[in-house]
Amino acid sequence: MDEAVLVVAILFIIMGVAGVFIPYIGISETMRPLAEFSAFLLALGIVMLPIGLLRGGLPILSSGKVYALSFMGISLISFVLVSAALQIGPFAKVEQIGLTGPTPFNVTIVILPGSYDPAATETYSPASVKVLARYNSTVIWVNAEKVSVAHTVTSDQGLFDSGLFGAGERWVFVFGRAGIYPYHCTPHPWMVGTVTVVEGPLPETPPQQPAS
């Protein structure tokens, strides 16, 4: 048994499991690159685990280190496999609520200047909108900050996430299913808003834009 390789394998597995699962417990999409790198560490650790156990011959089964390290590695791998089987964490099925193309009309939500301040009383204008699916359910968030501050539009339900976009930039999402979709800004959680999507017959006249 090569204890050095075994210990490194266990560390890689621990870091991999943590890095893969952390971005899926409410942290923004901006952390997803961490999950991708952590998945590589996890896979590398899984490959190194049997190498560490078997390198130099079979380990002495009476060794307490063998039992402890093997138990840790197998437990972590089992945790990942069970999560995949139960479809939880990064293996959860994502509900598809978005459309791939724009709708005939859209609604614009402005991220107001100064929204980054915890004392701000108004951050989105309008903070709540109601749209009709496949008609005016293209929602555009515009970052109107006067200083260099980035925001996200992050679903409270984990259904969509813009990632960070800076002052003067915008993010577009096309809702395709009825429902109530609360959202927030990950770096500034006091920024909250809601998009309510309804379904029904498409009107023949253009929709009224919500007041800014």
Image: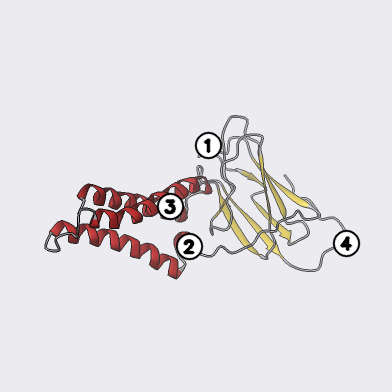
Q: Nearer the viewer, residue 89 or 161?
A: 89
Q: Nearer the viewer, residue 170 or 40?
A: 40
The crowd level at tag 2 (other Cα within 10 Å; few <14, some 14-19, many 20+) is some
SS state under label 1 = loop
Residue contact at pointers 4 and 2, CB within 8 angstroms = no
The label nearer to you, 1 versus 4, is: 4
Residue at point 44%, 66% (across, down): 84
Which x, y percent locates residue 104? 81, 55
The residue beneath circle 2 is: 91
- Is 61 rendered above or below residue 146? below
The residue beneath circle 1 is: 117
Query: Which quadrant would the C terminus be assigned to in this image?
Result: top right
SS state under label 2 = helix
Q: Based on the displayed image, in which of its 4 quarters is residue 47 positioned?
A: bottom left
The label nearer to you, 3 versus 1, is: 3
- Is 123 rendered above or below residue 208? above
| Relative to 37, 166 lies left or right | right
